[in-house]
Image (spheres, rainbow, N blue to C red):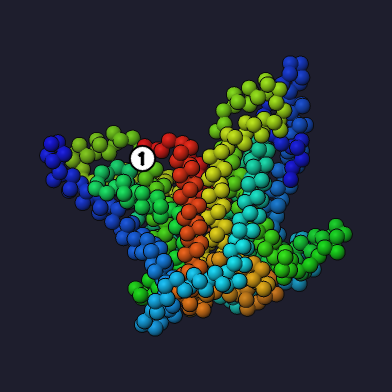
Amino acid sequence: MAEPASLPKPTRIAPPGVSRPVTRRWALLPTYIVLTALLVFAVGPLLVSWVSAFKTSQQIIYEPFALPSPWTLENLDKAWNVGRFGRYIWNSVLISVGAVVGTVVVATLAGYAFARLRFLGRGLLMLLLLLGLTIPISAIIIPLYLTMRDVHLLDTQWSVVVAHVAIGVPIFTFMMRGFFRGLPRELDDAARVDGSGELRVFWSVMLPLVRPGVLTIALLEFLWSWNSLLLPLVFLTRDELRTLPVGLLFFQGRASVDWGPMSAGVMIIALPIVALFLIFQRRFVHGLTGGAVKG
Amino acid sequence: MRQRASSPFRIRASLTAYGFVGLALLLWGFFVLRPTIEVFFLSLYRWDGIAPIRTWVGLDNFAKLAADPIFWKALGNNLAWLAMVVTFNVSLGLVTAALLAQKIRGRLFFQAGYFLPVVQAGIVVALTWRWIYNPDGLLNESLDLVGLSDFTRGWLGDRSLALPALALATGWAGFGLAVVIFLAGMQGIDRELYDAAAMDGANGRQAFRHVTVPGLRNVFTVVLLLEVIGAFQAFDVIWGTTQGGPLHATEVLATYMFKKGIAEGQYGYGSAIAVVFMVIVLVVAVISIAVRERGEPADG
């Protein structure tokens, strides 16, 4: 907890005669100290675990904070070959790319219709999807599992892809609707007056203008499907179909004390997400809080 | 009159629109809405999923739940979990956001750092913290370094500490989101209110209490909703570490449902557990949406 002195001082009006820059610089020193401590708390565990991926399992235990000496690729090699992470990466990529493509197609079409087209039952369907936003997915995992079994998708990657796309429909439809509504109405009206069909208006006029929105939902769907544990855990029972998170879960069971290869596995899962986050930070933050904070 | 004149056109326009929304609605209806309804029906049967006949047992599964000490333990753990994670995320998120709301150099850098754990997979959070809490892990090593060796222990093997320890891991992975949401809320508060408070002689703390906190009322609702839904769905971090142990000390509804419903194939009983936490989440969600809609005009 921060001491009272570090709470915000929103008073921006300095009394006359006081040299403001100097006082302010020193006044903020405790703030920087607390913020830096919080930064260490947030990022420290991740950094230590990534560094550990290049240490021997013994050094991880005896010198957890030290830099690797010697640097070793043994853990990555072990994770790749013994842990079969090469296979799991391929499965994860396949499922995530499938989920992203499916989501983009489904949500842009639906979002456009809800934003621009008038049709019977639109209000009712919107309300239904709004309620759908609140359905806790882990609560429907049993009937969802039975559904996948009945349509013979169990133990295929399709089950996870289809489930992710379906689960994302409410949130991503709402997000795309928001992006389409942000475009000036004159644009598509003009295209319609020119005699373009609805599909053409959507494809050649509107879609190119919401590319930032498409990128946002693609990133979020990638994040969620890449990180997801429960769905692939329940739907995929054969080892050669497992995704990275599920593979790591079972690898943990098999090698309960071998922290070296484990750190390598953790790093492999985190790497693409961290890279995307560093490139598209604003989009991630905005997307993940977009439903929460308006604007 | 005008409506009737345009109605053939309207029907055609509607058909086009249904083409646009059809795929989304079919997928969602079949794979989300239908299972949501079905889970309520399943909870009224005893069924192993394989036998062609489901045995109708009415509310027996719920009677069994009411007499199941592990269920009550799991529900209690969920509530304790919720209290701990909410307290942690709201207080730390609020304080951090308040600090960042000042004229800070490198605000985006700090914010990115706090947010980095938010985008990590549940299994990554689980394994990172399992290693921290391990008997020869980071935490005990740190305690040794500062001379507090007496406090070292196997954190996740301790029945009274395992749940708070995992709640802390979850708070670590979530407070960055609260920081960003609170910060956005604070930046939306009218500066003049602070100037007015300063003129009335309020110090920083008083201004925080009487201007910042009331100005964040809607934001609080949002954060609380996210936390409640998240807390009752807690699964990944627990499944990746203790799987509900030791002796159900970290059992929550989602892990217990997974064990009964998926691992043991008791679809009826598992569904009854699912119904309980579905109802809790839906009630909370509907209440907080109602509160929120009343707080601000609906977007038209």
Quick check: A174 above or below B257?
above
| B224 relative to B131 in the view: left or right | left
Q: A239 or B191, which lies in front?
A: B191
Disc 1 residue crowd, few under 14, some 14–19, many 20+, Cα 10 Å? some
The residue that mark 1 highlights is: A181
Q: Chain of mark 1?
A: A
Residue at left 45%, top 71%?
B59
Q: Quadrant of residue B200?
A: top right
Whether residue B95 is visible? yes
Q: Quadrant of residue A250?
A: bottom right
| A107 relative to B237 in the view: left or right | left
Expressed as whole percent of the image width and height from the top left, the position of residue B52 reads 36, 82
Residue at left 63%, top 54%?
B83
Quadrant placement of the N terminus of chain A: top right
Quick check: A235 above or below A136?
below
Residue at left 54%, top 74%?
B259
Quick check: A71 above or below B17?
below
Q: B257 or A61, which lies in front?
A: B257
| B222 relative to A120 in the view: left or right | right
SS of the residue at dot 1? helix
Whether residue A113 is visible? no
Task: Work out which residue is located at the far right of the displayed protein and give it.
Answer: B147
Expressed as whole percent of the image width and height from the top left, the position of residue B167 reads 65, 59
